[in-house]
């Protein structure tokens, strides 16, 4: 059943799926399959949808993901060009190098777009699932960088200290991520059964917790390095009835698919664009719940 939309002040985060694949096969990837058949993928349709979302929520966050946004820099540039600097822009990437893309090309790209890109989140996992460009490249970029690391199933926790040393050298913050396909409303904030928190508590200093209905972050300090352990639910809409008895679909993420289709969740639910133009805004419920962050 469909309800009126509600979202946070500024608008739901808009995640754009680049219409190009990556060269990797991470075991936890749920997007890879979509890139097997590229029929209907359209940068032009994606650009039209970016314009629509900018028009409705001119201050929302944009996230580019994939696939691999850096598979085609010129395409990524055209999409970025449509996004005014009123938005924060994040790019999830592995920073791939190939014939036609050198380290310097990527550095120059970040230099050209440094007023636009808020942060580049680079996937570097404890187990080497992705083809990796050199670590120093992350430090050489002209924009802030963060490392994202999925701690999947029986991850090798004895490798955590070495892994963290790798990034401490460059002062690049690390975000560990729980496998979100295994996150539920029951285990989102649960510390007892969590398979990762004890390992982090052993090696780093706990600083505090922030979170909302949809996601949370446990913050740590590892020898001066900022560490976060992030958990998020595998969907992006929460249905809730307010104190006046009105039930809303509360949207956290809006997704622009590779064919330009705009969805209100990670499944196939389409966003009712006209309804979203009348969205009710609420204060962002992401709050510091423990510590001083
Ligand atoms: S790099 Fe990203 S898109 Fe590619 S397989 Fe891994 S998780 Fe999936």
Image: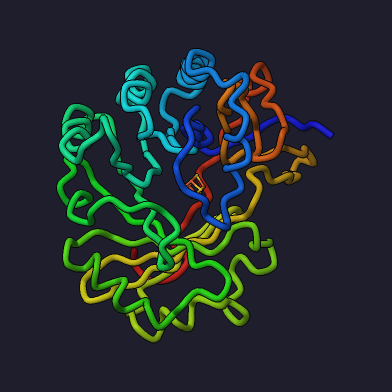
Instruction: Please name the colour scheme applied to the rendered image.
Output: rainbow
* Residue found at the very far front of the displayed protein: 99
Whole-percent x, y for residue 183 in the image: 64, 62
* Residue found at the very far bottom of the displayed protein: 202
As drawn, is 50 to the left or to the right of 182? left
* Residue found at the very far right of the displayed protein: 1
In the image, what residue occupies the spot 28% across and 60% down?
173
In the image, what residue occupies the spot 39% across and 21% down?
79
Which of the image's four quarters has the C terminus?
bottom left
Whole-percent x, y for residue 256 in the image: 56, 28
Residue 151 vs residue 218, the one in the foreground: 151
Using the image, determine if residue 65 lies above or below residue 235.
above
Can residue 217 be seen by looking at this rendering?
no
In the image, what residue occupies the spot 58% across and 28% down?
257
Whole-percent x, y for residue 92 in the image: 40, 43
Which of the image's four quarters has the N terminus?
top right
| Count of number-bearing discs | 0
As drawn, is 73 to the left or to the right of 103? right
As drawn, is 167 to the left or to the right of 123? left
In the image, what residue occupies the spot 27% across and 50% down?
133
Please identify the quarter of the rendering in which residue 124 is found. Answer: bottom left
Whole-percent x, y for residue 73 in the image: 32, 27
Using the image, determine if residue 208 lies above or below residue 242.
below
Using the image, determine if residue 61 lies above or below residue 172.
above
Can residue 100 be seen by looking at this rendering?
yes
Please identify the quarter of the rendering in which residue 81 is found. Answer: top left
Residue 70 vs residue 277, the one in the foreground: 70
As drawn, is 171 to the left or to the right of 154? left
């Amino acid at each position: 059943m469909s309800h009126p939309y509600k979202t946070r002040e500024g608008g739901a985060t808009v995640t754009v799926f680049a219409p190009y694949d990556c060269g990797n096969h991470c075991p936890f990837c749920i997007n890879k399959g979509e890139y097997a058949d590229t029929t209907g993928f359209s940068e032009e349709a994606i650009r039209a949808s970016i314009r629509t979302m900018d028009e409705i929520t001119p201050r929302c966050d944009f996230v580019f993901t994939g696939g691999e946004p850096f598979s085609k820099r010129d395409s990524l540039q055209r999409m970025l060009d449509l996004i005014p600097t009123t938005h924060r822009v994040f790019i999830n990437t592995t920073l791939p190098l190939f014939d036609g893309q050198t380290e310097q090309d990527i550095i120059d790209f970040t230099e050209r777009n440094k007023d636009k890109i808020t942060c580049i989140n680079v996937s570097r996992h404890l187990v080497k699932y992705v083809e990796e460009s050199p670590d120093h490249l992350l430090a050489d970029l002209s924009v802030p960088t963060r490392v994202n690391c999925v701690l999947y199933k029986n991850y090798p926790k004895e490798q955590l200290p070495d892994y963290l040393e790798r990034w401490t050298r460059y002062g690049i913050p690390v975000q560990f991520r729980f496998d979100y396909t295994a996150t539920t409303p029951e285990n989102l904030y649960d510390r007892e059964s969590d398979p990762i928190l004890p390992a982090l508590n052993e090696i780093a200093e706990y600083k505090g917790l922030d979170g909302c209905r949809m996601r949370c972050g446990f913050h740590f300090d590892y020898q001066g390095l900022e560490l976060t352990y992030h958990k998020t639910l595998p969907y992006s809409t929460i249905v809730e009835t307010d104190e006046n008895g009105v039930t809303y679909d509360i949207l956290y993420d809006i997704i622009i698919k590779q064919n330009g289709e705009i969805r209100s969740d990670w499944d196939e639910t389409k966003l009712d664009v006209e309804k979203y133009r009348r969205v009710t805004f609420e204060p962002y419920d992401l709050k510091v719940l423990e510590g001083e962050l």
